[in-house]
Amino acid sequence: MSSLLPEPVRRLAAWCTVFLLVTGVTAVLVWLCVTFKTAVTPVLLALLGTALLGPIHRRLLRMRVNRSLAAALTCLAVVAVVGGAAYVVVLALIETGDQIIESLRKAGRDLAEHFGAAGTSVEDLAKNSRDLLSKFGGTAASGVIAGLSVVGQMLATTVLALLLIFFFLRDSHRAADTLRSMAPTRSGDMIEAMGRRAFEAVEGFMRGTTFIALIDAVLITVGLLVLKVPGAVGLGALVFVTAYIPYLGAFLSGAVAVLVAFADRGWIIGLWALGVVLAVQVIEGNVLQPVVQSRTVQMHPAVVMLSITAGASVAGILGMLLAVPLTAAAFGVVSELRARYTADAAPGPAGPAPASGTAKG
């Protein structure tokens, strides 16, 4: 039957079969991850944490520290740093959160006066944000079961992810053997290479994104402090957190900073704040991104936006945070497969030229 079809149609049918198979497997994997998200989420967070903390652990190992002790020290250092930073950020947000939200509401009213109904969405957003924060704050303070359940689940996920990071760091030298044991004998090398490339892509993304987020947050915070914008530290913390959502996070945090400056300091300071945000984005796009991410998997902005949208549709904010590193890992696997198949398909070196004459006895 297939011999009756022309060659282009047979190729199209083969590619359609491969596409349907890959789509089906991906859909099943996504369904399993959503179904068992309580167990999957700590594992994914631990993998990201391991990719970010791997260099610190390896440096301790080079200093001849025991593997278990090195993993424990790395986790303790992360708890100390992240806990201290979280305390500072939460304290700044508590002190300036109401002021920032009130500034957003004021900006919404001013925009509504100038542009009509188009500006009311900003005020509605600020009002809903304040209501949401009040709801969660009141729930946690009053000890309602639902609020305690959410807090308990978050704490359990964090603790489990931290324990998994310890085990992943301690046993990282066994990862290659584990991958080989799970793969067929002839595919061991390829599976190991794919796993290494995927992890290197995630590691490069996490380190690069963290460094860029820190630089962006510091520069914007300094700029807002110079302009005397209220809540500058809280806005800088917002910039750092949202930087893990490429493109969209920078747009949202920059827009909030500009609106707060516009509401409290007027049009002139608002334009200066806009200039600070745009200058930081130009530095990031033309200096930091090319230098920091030159050794990682490069992804087109359209691919990043689509992955963020898909992650948000599957798992909300957590999906947005996990979508890009997982896409980077997938790109790493694809690049490794392409390199291997390209090398296999390349013609080998030419053999020795045949002798022009016959040998005489």
Image (spheres, rainbow, N blue to C red):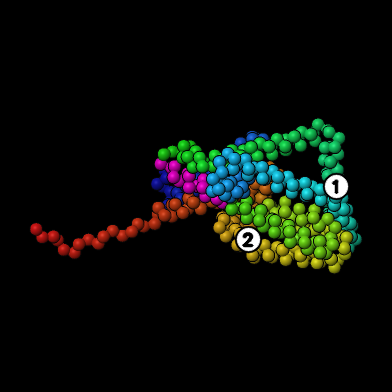
In this orientation, which residue lies closer to the viewer: 143 or 21?
Answer: 143
In this orientation, which residue lies closer to the viewer: 270 or 64?
Answer: 64
Q: Residue at x 59, y 56 (%)?
A: 299
Q: Residue furthest front?
A: 64
Name which residue type carries label 1.
Arg
Q: Which residues are magenta?
A: 186-202
What is the x, y in percent for residue 277? 75, 63
Name which residue type carries label 2.
Gln
Q: Are marks 2 and 1 in contact (CB under 8 Å)?
A: no
Q: Residue at x 81, y 57 (%)?
A: 232
What is the x, y in percent for residue 309? 67, 50
Q: Residue furthest top?
A: 145
In this orientation, which residue lies closer to the viewer: 88 or 298?
Answer: 88
Relative to 102, is 285 above or below?
below
On the image, which quarter does residue 300 sit in?
bottom right
Under tag 2, what secondary structure? helix
Q: Say which residue label 2 marks.
A: 289
Whichever of callouts 2 and 1 sits on the residue coming sooner in the sequence is: 1
On the image, which quarter does residue 219 sit in?
bottom right
Q: Say which residue label 1 marks.
A: 130
Under tag 1, what secondary structure? helix
